[in-house]
Image (spheres, rainbow, N blue to C red):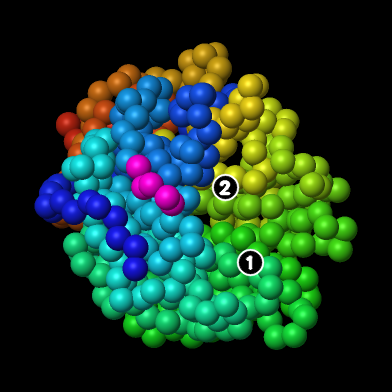
Amino acid sequence: MIEFPWSHPLRLLALCVCLDAAAQTLDWSGGVTVFGTAEDERASVLVLSPSGARLRALCVRNDSCLCMKVSSDNGASWSASSDSTFPGFRLRARGTADASYHYILVCPEASSARRLFRFEPASNSFGAAWTMTIAPERDGTVLSFDVMTDVAFQPADAYLNVCWVEQNAPRLRKLCFAQSQNRAVSFEPARELVSFEAGDGTEASVSLGAAWQGDEECLWIAASVDRPGSIPEEIRLFRSSDQGSTWTASGAVDAAAVSQTQPSLVAYGATIVLAYSYAALSNARDVRLVYSLDGGATFAPPQVVAGSNADEYSPRLVIDDSGTAFSLFYLTSRVGSDSATVMLCSGSLATPWEIGAPVAICDADAAVASEEFSASTGAHGTAVLWTSRFVTGDCDVRFDAAWRGNPSAERGAAVPRQTALQAVYPNPFNSFATVVLLVDHPAPLTLTVADPLGRIVRTIPCGTFVSGEHHVRLNFGGLSSGMYFVRIENSPAPPRKALLIR
């Protein structure tokens, strides 16, 4: 068992967040360098706070040094790098966030270690992080892993979910799951979902997601699992409706007898979207997408996202905070090339089969094909962090986001004449609704929710919004069915009706 040298006291942060403010107009502008020394930087991780402008970026420098920076202004500026070295290891990391903390899971290659770091959003110190080892009793080599919070379903929930594929013998692999119900203070014992024999060269990959209908949440894991005989690996889905205590295999989503790897799974409400890499006979991979609109009871047939002659792979799905749209990032390159381009397609969760045309996020062949990249979403939209090749040959890590580079004319045209609530959607709704907030000038705003008798049942401090249109997601959890009225506190603007149906 490999252990890391850090162990620090728990630091608690009391932070109550009941809303998210959503994306501005997409206008990707080429990105900025976040990590750019003369050494090699790769394996990027990007975490955005669900509500607010705080971002955390990490990368691996020269295989064994984990580097971290934070931004408190949506990536306009970044802190100095905080570094921590793991001598002798080639590092890998994944990240996520909830309303209170940022979580970074580190699993070095060829080791059994699963080390979790929990940071307060403004902290840029490894020494100040709460750290722990997940499932220390398991000694299988970690091949692939993922981590996810419950912030989309219940923003106040303290649940943190982790899954991984481990190798216990030359050909034996196991898919495992562990959950914390107290924001990583402790974890429930790990559970094995499935074990299987893997052939030579079989790729391991795994992704977590959660869907819900009414007040019931279902956890989903998509994993690349080897098939008997000479047939390559396929994507299999696993579902739990009791917070990971028991799991059922939901079977394959693609019956084609070709290699299916690199799943990326997201869900919102009863909609599940899965993207994965599909190996064509020409050795050029395609990115395929399947979806379910009924909580996973049925899935639509797979569809090809781009389908060009190029190699397309490493999909990354994210859902915007309003729960209405998804973004699909992926890499594309010439077959056999080590240079790639980061691409983006967008779609609506209501009609996931309608996918927009691909848009290049970076210059052609400016990304490194062999390196993973990271995409995340937060209060102001979607952002991406990727590995690029510097002109002298070493690798740097670059950042771009949906809110960067909007033309000034477009921003000026979007300023409303007065601050007001424009709409509530969906309406009626169950548990969550989004209000469209028009802001004529920057100012601190608070929303109130009142019942038909005028009694305030919820007060929601929003902070300060810049001028323009914002989408604010409200949590009506704990309230009974009925009509409610949402308004801006101390404002003459009329309220908006919101019908909650349980």
Tell whether position 87 is magenta. Answer: yes
Relative image position of residue 476 (x, y in whole percent): 27, 58
Residue extending farthest to the front is: 88
Quarter of the image with the N terminus is: bottom left
Rendered position, 278 above or below 319: below
Tell whether position 64 is magenta. Answer: no
Which residue bears the numbered disc 1? Answer: 203
Q: Could you tell whether 15 is left or right of 356 in the image?
A: left
Which residue bears the numbered disc 2? Answer: 372
Label annotation for residue 455: none
Please state which amino acid type lies under the numbered disc 1: Glu
Instruction: Choose top left, top right, bottom left or bottom right for residue 106.
Output: bottom left
Relative image position of residue 458 (x, y in whole percent): 18, 51
Residues drawn in magenta: 85-89
Which residue is at a point 64% across and 38% down the rendered structure image? 368
Rendered position, 341 above or below 205: above
